[in-house]
Every structure is written in structure tokens, then in C-alpha cells.
Image (cartoon, grey):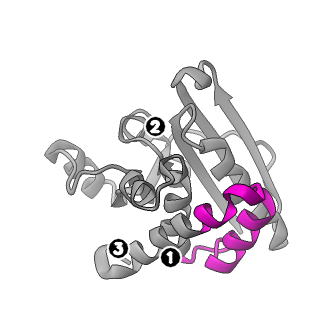
Amino acid sequence: MKLEIVCAGVGGRGVLLASTVLIEAAIASGQKAVASDEYGMSQRGGSVVSLVKIGDCASPFIGRENAHILMAFEESEFYKTLFFLKEGGIAFVNTGKKILPGSVQDLLKKRKIVHHLVDADGIARNEGMIQSANMAMLGYLAFSNIPPFSEKQLKDTIRARVPEKFLSKNLAVFQKGFDEAGTGKVGW
């Protein structure tokens, strides 16, 4: 198995926690996993990119057009990091929009990239935990059941990683993201 994932967002949006959950879920399922994080002024809302590789990998770095999955926790970061995604890849984009600009859709279609627009902020806000939009994104990913990221494995990893006082809300947001993906709005 080899899977390359780019998690992109801004500081304070849970990008690093989400990538840690992905790494630990992969390891718990018996896979090798490595990561590299790039962040500068992340605590002030600057860009954060976490590169996650699952399987036999010599390096944690992901080259241009090599990632299988792009998880964009901010729409603006999706545009900045789209170059990582390989032809035929999958993108999950946190946005309240129902549709991306025509030129972007044309590019995604040309490169056979499946994309899912997830209102993760809205899901988290409705659960009273706006800072947990990352959990809604992970729930949405779990619906795809891309090994090793089953719903059970991701939930187990969240239980092990998130502090007890935030756990129930984070799991609720995760479940809402999973349920949202299952409403037929996902193109699998």
C-alpha cells in the first residue's frame, strides 16, 4: 500500500491534529507512516501544510502531482496546494460554496480529480464546536473508506488523541461529517 495525503489549512484550524490522527490511524492498522509539517506564522493564521505518506516511503516529502488525497481545511489553501494532487486524485475542500469557479472545475475535470465540497465549518458551528471543523473533514473522509481510514479506525484514534473534555463534541462533529457524506452528496 502507498498513499500520499496533503493536509492544508491555516493556523488554528486543526490541520496538524488531523494529520496526526491520519498517521496514528495508519500505524494502528499496521501500516508504516511518515509526515512532514510546514508552518511558519501558523499561530497567526498563516499557511500550514502537512504531508502524510502511508506505506513504504523513503522520505516524507510529496512532489508535484503525486498526492492521492488533498484535504483542504480552507478553500484558499485548496487553490494554493492543488498542484500536489495527482491526476485521478480526490480533494476534500472545506467551503460553504456549492460549486467552484468554472475555470477550476474545468481543470479538475481535465485532470480527473474527484472533489467534494464540505461545509465543515457549518457542521462544526451547528454542533457548537466551530474549532472542530477538522473533525467534520475526517468524518467525510471516513465515509470514503479508503484504507486504512475506516470510520472505526479514525474514531478510535480520535478517542486516543483528543483530550477528554473535548472528546464528545469532536466525535459528534466527526459523525455529522460522516453522515453528511452519506446523504448522497458524495460522488463515490
Q: Which mark is residue 121?
A: none
Circle 2 residue: 81
Q: Earlier in the sequence, mark 1 or mark 3?
A: 1
Is residue 139 rendered to the left or right of residue 156? Answer: left
Check if residue 169 falls in the magenta segment. Answer: yes
Task: In the rendered view, tell whether residue 99 sits above or below residue 13.
Answer: below
Based on the displayed image, in which of its 4 quarters is residue 166 positioned?
bottom right
Q: Dot 2: few (<14), some (14–19), or many (≥20) neighbours within 10 Å?
A: some
184 with respect to 161 (left or right): left
Q: Which residue is mark 1?
A: 143
Above/below status of 159 relative to 20: below
Q: Dot 3 lies on which element?
A: loop
Q: CA distance from mark 2 to mark 3?
A: 22 Å
Question: Mark 2 or mark 3, which has the lower sequence index?
Answer: 2
- Are the residues at dot 1 and dot 3 in contact (C-beta closer than 8 Å)? yes
**Residue type beneath disc 1:** Phe
Label 1 secondary element: helix
Q: Name the residue beneath numbered marker 3.
A: 186
Q: Secondary structure at mark 2?
A: helix
Q: Is residue 54 visible?
A: no
Q: Which quadrant of the figure has residue 55?
A: bottom right
Is residue 66 placed above or below 167 in the rendered structure? above
For the point 47% across and 52% down, the residue is 86
| Whole-percent x, y for residue 160 in the image | 81, 64
Q: For marks 1 and 2, give the one nearer the viewer.
A: 1
| The C terminus: image quadrant | bottom left
Task: Name the one closer to the observer, 108 or 10.
Answer: 10
Helix, strand or loop: magenta stretch:
helix
Residue occupying image coordinates x 71% and y 75%: 153
Q: Earlier in the sequence, mark 1 or mark 2?
A: 2
